[in-house]
Image (cartoon, rainbow, N blue to C red):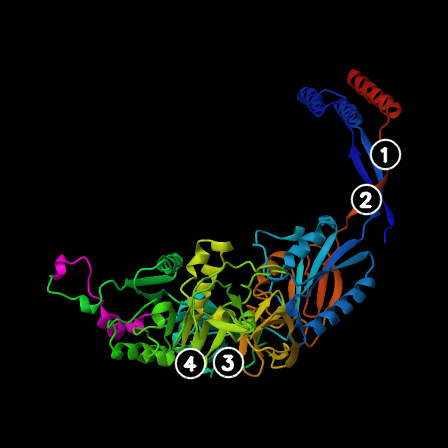
Amino acid sequence: MRFEQAIAALRFDPVLPGWLLAGLGGLCAVALAVALWRRARGTGWRFLAFAVLLLWLGGPRLVEETRETLPDIGLLVVDESASMGLGARAGLAAAARTKIEAAARELPDFELRTVVVPEEGSEGTLLFAAIERALADIPRARLAGILAVSDGQAHDAPAVNGPPFGGAPLHLLVPARGEEVDRRVRIIAAPGFGIVGRTATIRMTVEDLGVARNGLAIFGSARLTIRRDGEAPVVENVPIGLEHQVDIPITRGGPSVIELEAEPLPGEVSTVNNKAIVVINGVRDRLRVLLVSGEPHAGERTWRRLLKADPVVDLVHFTILRPPEKDDTTPSNEMALIPFPTRELFQVKLREFDLVIFDRFQNRSVLPPVYLRNIADYVRAGGALLMSVGPEFTGATSLAPSPLGSVLPARPIPLGAVVNEAFRPGVTALGERHPVTAGLAPAVASGPPGWGQWYRRIAVGGEVGGSVLMDAPEGAGRAPLLVVDHVGQGRVALLLSDQIWLWSRGHDGGGPQAELLRRVAHWLMKEPELEERALVARLEKGQLTVERRGIEDGPPGEVVVTDPAGAKATLALTPLRPGQARGAMPAALAGVWQVTDGTLNAFAAGESANPLEFADLRATASVLAPLVRASGGSVHWLDPAGAPALRRTEPGRESSGSAWIGLQRRHDHLVSGVAATPLLPAWLALPLILGLALLAWRREGT
């Protein structure tokens, strides 16, 4: 509402410049001083004449302004960030907003503008950014005050440098009974990766916010529960407010989800930030591979080049060029070849290797049965064995009838095991679903396949164990070519041909030699991404994605998802390719999500979308108190009294009371009209000056 009023004031509009008028006044003062010294008659009249002259030259005017008063503006800022959703805060804030807006409508000459502080993602509560945007449209001369309905947790509070907001008061209305307390788990440092077989250390602390502590002696402790991938929880007592180390043994490759949860603090506002989640990816430091080659052949360099090119592989390679029967009395320092270190490799250091490869190895009394039995036991205990065989697998020096044969998935047929004919390797139906060979088969609509031909393979007889991933044509059927198997806790792979090197040279179009051998080697060494049966869960941008891998032929089925609050939901999976299915669902809650298909379990860590917002959940006035004091404002607690009353106050007076908030009268206005009336016009001033001068002359002459 605007209204007009008239304001009269005396103003001067000098005829002469100020310096000239001051000089003229000085001459008049000198003339009067001389007259007074001589005691001349008529000095009083001279004084009046000079006074009228100087007054006329000063241009006195009576100015009457017509002013249009402007209403004052108040700013109501309502915090609607995530932390305001805790407890009864949102309800109290909404009730306060309604009451304040209703009271503002009853105030004359006043306008209230309301702005909302939204949830800002990962940036915390940007309360003052919203205030500055609103103030850009409000003249500071009309700002009566700012009322902020917030829990007091503002992450962009400016430094205090004198009265802010042009002298207008800032009033903070906190939706709580008083200062609150909160307990939180804070991660100081956590590794993203850990070496398998070693221990990763998480540095963390449990902090009680808003709780007065006097000295270390009474800091106390809290129970910390450590959960890892659904395993049995571990409970530790940790000191409050002091750094604590949690040691996590890395037992396998791939991600592990660790949840740290502190017991609740009595009276705390929320337990949302009593938990912290750390994801540690288990990686192998170095993969030690032992490659034992038989007599030199065309494919030997293929194996060595492949393994040396892998940056995570430490390769130990031996080629058997000097069997024991060629031992003689020649001194060792004069020999070009050394005896094969049998005992050191296959008894002393065998378990230090992650993978043992026999490439066309024939046992010409090089490995006694006791060492072959050691290799078999090494596999059963969790080791890995890869054999690439050729004609030597069928002769008297074959490893098939040795103690090592007990862990092999197939054996050569007694007669005619070496098949010398051209053929094109293919992937079996099972191989299309197995991660070792999935996606490797060339997509050919018609005509010959894209893989190059091989010319020799080893035929096997009897029952074939494990999984046949690749095969070759044999009469009206197919013959095994690549067989993998689980033996005890270990794994075995048998490649029944020594012709894969042809692919590396691009013969007849070549084939995926490097990728195939890499996958076989890493599957044997139990790399998580190549497991036949796996359930993987990921959380990204508020969505949970579940992937299931399996070698069974059947519908993808569904999985059961348990959210951090314990609620269960069923998620149907959609097939992507043979052996792989995927599903997705919204996942807004922070915490650990569990997925299970009844056999396999997977875990995913959902972090808070706004970690700053949930770092301190207290409703408090301590953060904004310096700004409130500097502005001359006040702090009011909304529970249980509700919003205080609104009053208009004058600048410099009290701005608040126990149950009321003051909004200043700024008295800003617009001048809509000006009327100026000369108080000593020329037609009056000149006769008056001449008359006074004449009276002074006559008085002096008598």
Quadrant assignment, res 28 = top right
Q: Would you name the residue on which mark 1 appears?
A: 676
Q: Crowdedness of circle 3 by 10 Å Cα count: few (<14), some, many (20+)? A: some
Which residue is at a point 77% across and 27% down the rendered structure image?
14
Query: Helix, strand or loop at disc 3?
Result: loop
Q: Residue at horizontal 40%, vertical 80%? A: 489
> Do labels 3 and 1 touch, CB within 8 Å?
no
The reply to whether dot 4 and dot 1 touch (C-beta < 8 Å) is no
Regarding mark 1 in the picture, which secondary structure is present there?
strand
Disc 2 residue type?
A: Leu
Q: Which residue is mark 4?
A: 237
Give x and y (percent) for residue 278: 49, 70
Location of mark 3 (residue): 230
| Mark 3 or 2, closer to the camera | 3
Q: Looking at the image, is mark 4 or mark 1 nearer the viewer? A: 4
Tell me which label, 3 or 4, sits earlier in the chain.
3
Q: Tell me the kind of residue under disc 4.
A: Asn
Q: Is residue 419 magenta?
A: no
The residue wearing badge 2 is 670
Viewer-side label of 2, 4: 4
Q: Is residue 661 left or right of residue 152?
A: right
